[in-house]
Every structure is written in C-alpha cells, then in structure tokens.
Amino acid sequence: MAKRAKLGQRVLVSFGRRRTTGFLVSFHEKLDPRATKAIQEILDSQSVFDENLLRFTHWIADYYLCPWGDVLKAALPAGITLDEKRRWILEALPKGDKWREYCHRHPDARRIVETLSSGPLTSESLRRKLRASRLPLEVRLLREAGIISLRPVLLPPRVKSKMEAIVSLAEEKASEDWEKLLADLETRSEQRILRDVLEAGPEGILRTELLKGASSVRRQALGKLLAKRLLQLRLEEISRWDPEREKAPEIVTPTQLTQAQEKALSRILPLLSAEKFKAFLLYGVTGSGKTQVYIEAIKEVLRIGKTALVLVPEIALTPHLWARFHAAFGDRVAIQHSAQSPAIRHDLWRGILRGDYPVVIGARSAVFAPLKKLGLVVVDEEQEATYKQEEADPRYHARDAALMRAHLERAAVLLGSATPSMETLYQVRQGKYELLTLPERVGGSVLPQIAIISRKQEDVKEVAPLSDELVTEIQAILTSGDQAILLQNRRGYAPFLMCRRCGFIPGCPDCAVSLTYHRRGRNLRCHYCDKREDVPDACPRCSSPDLAYEGIGTQRLEEELALHFPQARLLRMDLDTTTRRGAHGRMIAAFAAGEYDILLGTQMVAKGLDFPGVQLVGVVSADTELFHPDFRAAERGAALLTQASGRAGRRERVGRVLVQTFAPEHPIVKTVCEQDWLGFAEQELQRREAASFPPSARLVLVRFSGKDESKVARAALRFRSLLKSEGGVETLGPAPAVLYKLRGKIRYHLLVRSLRTRDESGATLRRAVKQARDEFHRTHAEAGVEIEIDVDPVGIA
Ligand code: ADP
Ligand code: ZN
Ligand code: ZN
C-alpha cells in the first residue's frame, strides 16, 4: 500500500466505531502506534489535492478556526466521500408461519420491515418514513428479536464517474493490413463492424454508438470479434458536462479596447509572468468594461501557459457571461453554477483536475477548483456578501481565500467592483493593492439622473406604495416601449400584520421575528424557519378585528402595479419565485429579450445584470436599507442603491432613477445622488476607525445557541472569562443576538476584537479565541449549548 500511496489521495480509515473518508496530507518515517490509525483502503488512484491545495486548505482551517478535514471535504464536489453511519438494516425474516404469527402479535411490525426492505436507513429517515414523531417502540422489539439491527453501514458515494466502453482494434493487430483482416472475416456483419471501428481511427469508438439501433445479428457479430481478439474493449471516463448545452446568446465581441481598458491592462499584463503575488482593484461602474479587461488578462495568462480562476456571485453566472467567455476561450473554459446536477459538477471537477479546462468560472466554492499553475484569480463584484459562507464550517470568505490562494501560488489577483468594499479600499489606502479605474461606461453613455422623492409629508399609515411621480414615470416607460426595474428589498405581500387597536404583531414562536404575510396561500410565514400560520380573524391579544397589513413586500407591489397598469407585463423576481433550478436564469433571459415591461423584486434585480432596454429604475422604499442594526448596514445599503441606480439608461440615452424615502437627508441617499462612492468610502472608513470596527479592527464572532437561555448566557460568560486579554484583544458582549431566537434556539453573541495597529495579521486574536475554545471544550460544563466561531463575520445578526 505504501508504494501506491500519494499525497492528496483519499483513504478509508476507521474512526471511533465507524469508518470514514480521510486524506493523505503528509508522510512520516516513524510512527507512534497509539496516535496512528491503519489505512484500510486507498480510494483514489490519483491525488485529488496537489501540494498547493493542501497548503491552501490548511491555511483556511487555520485562519477560520475549523477542522482541516472539513475544509478538504468542502473543497471536493458533493457526494463523493464515503461515510459510515449507523443505519437500520433488515437482517433475516423468520420463516413463513413464524413471521405471520409475529405480525399477528405485533401489527405494526410489517410496516417497519417493509420500509426497511428497500435499503438501510438512519434513525432519522426511518422515523420520517414512518411519519412518527419518534421511533416507535416496535423498532426496538424487532431489534431484540434479531429481525432488524442498527449498525454502521458504508454506503457507496452518491456520485460516480460515468464510464463508457470503447471499442478499438486490438493492439497486436495495429500493424496488419486492413484489407487482409476484412477478407478473413466470415460474415458481412463482422466486416461492417470492423470497417466502422477502423474508420473511427486508433482512438476507437463508443460501444453505444457502434450499436445504436443495431440488430441482434450485429450485436452478436461484435461479440465474436471481441472473442477472436481482433477488437478490444476498454473503459473510459466520460464527462457528462457538455459546454454546448450551456445556453449562450449571440454576442458581439469588441474589436478594440477603450483607452481606459488599455491603460488598466498595461499595469496588469507585465505582472502575470512575474511569479509574484500582486493585487489590483479594478474600480468601475457596471458597463464600464471590467469583464472585457478580465478576458484580455486571461488571454495573456493562457499564452504564458498558466491557468485562471474567475469568481462571480452566483447570481451573475448568466448565459450572457458564459457566452462572452465561451466566445473568447472555446473549449478551454468551464463554468460551475447551481443549476447543474451533482453528476455534472462532479465531472467538471474531474475535468479541471485532469487539466482539460485552464479557465474556470464559478461562484464561491470554485475558489477550490483544482487548477494547476494558477496565474490569475479574478473576483468580480468583490464586495458581495454572498462570498462569505456563513451556514457551516469552513466559514470562509471566497475573496479573502482567493487572495491567500494567489499569495501561496504567486499569482495575480484582480478584484472588480462598482462599489468596492471598505476592506479592499483600506488595502488600497495602505498601498498594498493597486487601484485601476475605468471612469466611464463603454460607448460613453451618461450616468442616470437621480431624483429623490420624499414621502415625509404624507400620513405614514395611509401612504401608498407608489408615489404620483413614480406612477407618471412608469406610465411614460410603458408608452415609449422601454423597460423599468423596481427594487423593493422585502419579499412576501406585506412585511407584517398589525392590530390597529393594541399594536400586536404576530411573530414566529421559534425565531423572534415578525411573520410576513403571503397573499398566495393567505398565510403568515417566517422567513427564517419557514413556519406557516393561518391569518387570524381577530387580534389574538385584544380580539379586535381591525388587523392591518403594514409595509410592502414584492407580492404587494406586484398587485399594486397590476392595479395601476393592467396592460403592463410584470415579472417578479425574489426568493419565492426563483427556487426552482434554473428559474432565475430563465427570468433574466426573458426580461433581456423584452418579454416583460417591468421587472420587480428584491436585491436580486440590482446585481450585475446588463439590460440595455431599461430606462427607469425605481427604489420603492430606500428606508428598508437605511436602518439595520449592523456596522456594515450603511455600506450595504449605499451599495445596493448605487447598483440599482446603475441599471438605468445603458447605451446612448440618459436613464432615470427615482428613490422613494422617508429620510431624504440621510447620508446614504446623498451618496447615491452624487454618485461618489470613493467620497462615501472615505467618510465610512473614518467612521469605522473611530468606532474600532473592520477594516480598522479585526473581529471574531462567537455564537452560542441552545434551548435554555440561562445555560446559553452562562456559556457565553464563561467563554469570555477564558479569553486572555493580551495584545489588545478585547470583547464586546456577550449579548442576545439581533435575531434573538432562531428555530427554537436562543442565540447569544460574543464579539472578540483586536486593533490592526497592534495585531496586523490578526494572529493574536485568533490564537486567543482558539485557546479559549479549546479550554472551553476541555472543561465542558454547559451541555446543550452549541458554539460557532465566525472569523471576519460579514453580518452580525
Ligand atoms: P462590466 O464588466 O464593467 O459591467 P463589460 O465588460 O460587461 O463591463 O462591458 C459592458 C458592455 O460593453 C458589454 O456589452 C461589452 O461587450 C461592451 N464592451 C466592453 N468593452 C468594449 C470595447 N472596448 N468596445 C466596445 N464594446 C465594449
Ligand atoms: Zn421561524
Ligand atoms: Zn389587538
């Protein structure tokens, strides 16, 4: 086994009482038998991680304070690791009569046995299939009777390579004369098959192709030729990903770069072959030609024999983007997006590993793409919060990880944005990243005119979602045959239901947030845990029937628009309408093709999309962005409004933007109007510095959650007491989280912070948190409290 073992292979090891997938990460000459596990099997013939990826994933584990194994697993496509879990298995049924007798005594037994007859199940899925709230007692009785058992079962990976049989001329016959080979054959069918194989060339031909619609005679003839060893059969891995099947609209490839593009490239290109890390910020509004700069830089990367990785937010992985890269790089580029099946993602990953695709485009997790000789990493819309994985370990930020990967592999990084993050601008100010600017839109189209519509004078209670000004502008768009986008960053019908008499607002019992009213289904829904409740006829607290819908969601807006403009073709885009695989891409394509007049929706409609027909953008309520209890709220709100207004008036004409707000003098609203992002950033960076928040400081968020509030609070306090306050490490809290209760669990936060001036790399901060965590686990007293650690948290709700 030692001879076959290579660094970066997957292996099967026993771990505790079960077996699981492990990774070969280093070799040692001597071993300590007590600290070593025997490898049972090597699962790969080739390495799935090279040395660079091992170093990179190790850095992520170290930086984000999570297990290396979790990072390695996250770096692989889903469904290929082997894991042993305890599962219920059907052992042996008693013989006929005995079994009938048993069922007579235990009427429920048959259903359980039948459920297990199709394969092993975990306790959880057995319970679910039996539609029981807990495992029935009968399960235990069946186990005691030896009819079923609970034991570790190794299940095969869910996704495997697709192998195809290929027929070719046997090697020994390669030098023989074809005519002679053909003449020696007895039947016409054999001759025809041999001719087909010979004509396909030395690589051979797929067996399925050779036998497409074949008669049994032809099938038998192939069998005979194989038996005679004139032909041979081999298995080859086939990719189920077919670039031709990705949708690609017609596009025009620019023939000449603009001056600004040339200037940016003149800084980037020389560095690509320099074998050293260097980061650029490419700052320019949407439509200023950033994507074209990426494409030109990648051409140079390929020319010098290196590879390139392009990260974009999931939402920007559109057919349009694909068309541009495909036109530039043909079959050397691969794209990963969420509409692809696990099998296709798997094959893509295998293809990248083999070196078939030197250019890879994808969302967050593509940062782990197994590219070799990396020359350039592009992170488009680098400010996007979706680059941060928040739900589970590793809680990494794909932009920051990309920077580190490039650093380790001595590659260049190109961060692109119309509204760069404070983190990136901070590095620019420190002189660490170079700023490149594309000051205007390609073709010189002018920036939109922005008008603020104050809704302050009106009666708050009765205010209509659409102001007269907005209605007039929409009417004008419909008359001229242009398109409009309306942003309302709240889904559902009305954000909440409120009793006009006592002010009661129905909330989710598990998640301390108000329930959102959904018109369809006429129910109230929790947007965190999806709990649904019927709308009450009267206030549950004071019994008043005077319940009112407050605020507007996208559903309500859609209805309002339909009332005002019955002839308009409306397209609503939010989480509720885009859950189906591929739905989002289809909507974008349909709107771009002019099948709708108005696109309305949540933040999704504001991001990185290019619709030339849009002349009007309406921000229905800017206020939903302005007041959030988070230190990044101002940046996020300003970015969203800036991006939304950037949708209006591409190409020759001046577009219009209307922003409705109750707070017209708010600094964010001013930023948007003046279209001065760098000016806003200057102030925002000062504010962050004054308040000791990132990027001037470093943060780690420690989250405690559990059912029992006093235990959760105690755990948080104990964690704080374990933190060493050396090197300027300090704590904020613990305090109940903004989202105080989620899915029935109480949540507390502890923020741990250090200042950049004293802890530039954040190493002191991370060491302190790590020590506290290890100590916390060692002396575990707070059972039933989970802790999660989020390094560089993006949202602190
Ligand atoms: P961004 O990535 O900043 O949004 P793009 O690169 O997508 O900008 O450019 C916006 C539009 O302008 C695209 O339709 C693109 O094809 C076109 N374009 C980009 N560069 C040029 C150029 N040099 N000449 C003509 N058209 C260009
Ligand atoms: Zn809930
Ligand atoms: Zn009431």
Image: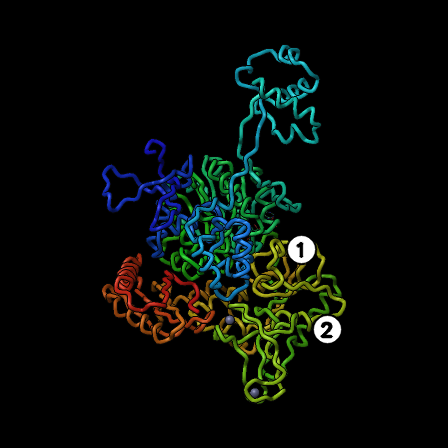
Which quadrant of the rendered structure holds the N terminus? Answer: top left
Amino acid tagged 1: Ala
Q: CA distance from mark 1 to mark 2?
A: 23 Å
Q: Residue at the location (52% across, 65% down)?
A: 132
Q: Which disc number belongs to residue 351?
A: none
Q: Which mark is residue 564?
A: 2
Q: Earlier in the sequence, mark 1 or mark 2?
A: 2
Position of 756 with respect to 569 (left or right) is left
- SS at mark 2? helix
Q: Is residue 520 left or right of residue 793?
A: right
Circle 2 residues within 10 Å: few <14, some 14–19, many ≥20: few
* Residue carrying label 1: 592
Residue 378 relative to residue 698: left or right: right
Q: As rendered, which of 703 and 17 lies closer to the eye? A: 17
Residue in view at x 54 percent, y 42 percent:
334
Colour convention of the picture? rainbow
Viewer can see residue 587? yes
At a point 61% along the width and 29% down the height, the residue shown is 207
- Residue 148 horizontal/vertical position (percent): 47, 53
Residue 790, given in percent of the width and then of the height, sits at 38, 61
